[in-house]
Image (cartoon, rainbow, N blue to C red):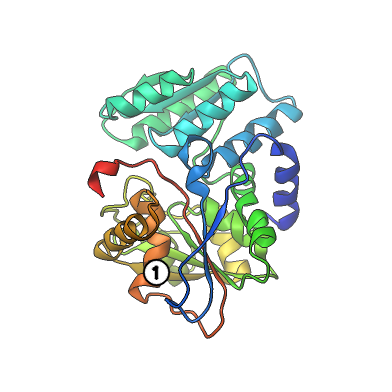
């Protein structure tokens, strides 16, 4: 569980190390009220995850937990790149475990920022187990992709910025995979705005958890599975969602693809499918704002192939 206090502390800790990403107003007349795009895809490494990674490493450093082994993470995607970047920025060694089939271009990116990359296993679960074992054996600080308080609180600094950049914001639409970003934003804006979690029909982690009353495993598929492919929502994400009354809506792959194309065609914004899911809720009608409702859409990542637009 995290609170606004945790997010405020994260903001102070990472001040000067992250970008204040801009807000772009959507064309007027399309919706019952104003819509703003929070352009978090312009963050370091192309996603919001650099915020949580920096917060996790700095907090560990403050507590004296860092050893010469540095940090370790299991992820060939945005989390791996963000933690490798944060570690390099702070002068800390980083080891990243990825599946054997991880794309060569992603492995190259990790090595380019100075991480030691260990490949092995057929899927993410194997890399995760190896990373946890590495942490236990070396004393390296493990950085989870989403389900750690400092990771989620760091991500929540996006919400603090929104409160300043979009005065009077009523609703924040955010895509959910493991739920770290959603949890952080919900904690940041609690009492000021509601949060609507947007999930692909092929990976409804929070939706299923709210229905079941606790996190449950779901089958994962679809165009956004590379970034919203967690098999279950994290414990932190679920707890904050329940406390803050976060709503969950589902969108189809076709909705996500259409939203990604609309962002490019209408605004020349390039985002990954997972980020486009948040906007898909508006375009598809999965979420319908009320008259005058001010909506902010978090566009959380842009690590994608522009050739597929």
**What SS does tag 1 mark?**
helix
- Viewer-proximal residue, 71 or 218? 71
Residue 131: x and y in percent read 45, 27
Residue 252: x and y in percent read 28, 65
Query: Vertical placement of 204 versus 146: above or below?
Result: below
- Viewer-proximal residue, 89 or 205? 89
State the residue at coordinates (70%, 50%). 7
State the residue at coordinates (44%, 25%). 96
Residue 140 visible, this orientation? no
Figure disc tally: 1
Residue 162: x and y in percent read 63, 59
Residue 242: x and y in percent read 57, 68
- What is the crowding at mark 1: few (fewer than 14 residues within 10 Å), some, or many (at least 20)? many
- Viewer-proximal residue, 217 or 177? 177
Dividing the picture into quadrants, the one containing residue 306 is: top left
Query: Vertical placement of 56 versus 161: above or below?
Result: above
Query: Vertical placement of 8 versus 69: above or below?
Result: below
Residue farthest along the bottom direction in this orientation: 291
The quarter in which the N terminus is drawn is bottom right
299 relative to 274 in the view: left or right: right
Dividing the picture into quadrants, the one containing residue 139 is: top right
The residue where tag 1 is placed is: 281
State the residue at coordinates (64%, 42%). 150
Residue farthest along the top direction in this orientation: 68
Residue 94 visible, this orientation? yes
């Amino acid at each position: 569980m995290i609170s606004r206090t945790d997010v405020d502390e994260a903001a102070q800790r990472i001040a000067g190390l992250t970008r204040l990403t801009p807000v772009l107003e959507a064309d007027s007349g399309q919706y019952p009220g104003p819509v703003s795009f929070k352009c978090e895809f312009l963050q370091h490494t192309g996603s919001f995850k650099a915020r949580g990674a920096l917060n996790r490493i700095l907090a560990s450093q403050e507590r004296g937990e860092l050893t010469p082994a540095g940090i370790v993470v299991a992820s060939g995607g945005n989390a791996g790149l963000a933690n490798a970047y944060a570690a390099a920025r702070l002068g800390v060694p980083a080891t990243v475990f990825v599946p054997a089939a991880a794309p060569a271009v992603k492995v190259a990116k990790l090595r380019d920022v100075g991480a030691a990359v260990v490949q092995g296993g057929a899927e993410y679960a194997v890399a995760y187990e190896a990373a946890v074992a590495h942490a236990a054996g070396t004393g390296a600080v493990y950085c989870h992709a989403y389900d750690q308080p400092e990771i989620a609180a760091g991500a929540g600094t996006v919400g603090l910025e929104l409160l300043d950049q979009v005065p009077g914001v009523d609703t924040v639409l955010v895509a959910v995979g493991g739920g770290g970003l959603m949890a952080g934003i919900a904690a940041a804006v609690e009492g000021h705005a509601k949060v609507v979690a947007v999930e692909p029909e092929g990976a409804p982690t929070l939706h299923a958890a709210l229905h079941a009353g606790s996190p449950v495993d779901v089958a994962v598929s679809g165009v956004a599975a590379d970034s919203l492919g967690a098999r279950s929502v994290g414990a932190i994400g679920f707890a904050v969602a329940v406390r803050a009354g976060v709503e969950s809506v589902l969108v189809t792959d076709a909705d996500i693809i259409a939203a990604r194309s609309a962002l490019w065609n209408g605004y020349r914004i390039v985002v990954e499918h997972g980020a486009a899911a948040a906007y898909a809720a508006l375009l598809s009608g999965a979420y319908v704002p009320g008259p005058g409702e001010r909506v902010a859409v978090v566009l959380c990542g842009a690590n994608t192939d522009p050739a597929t637009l």
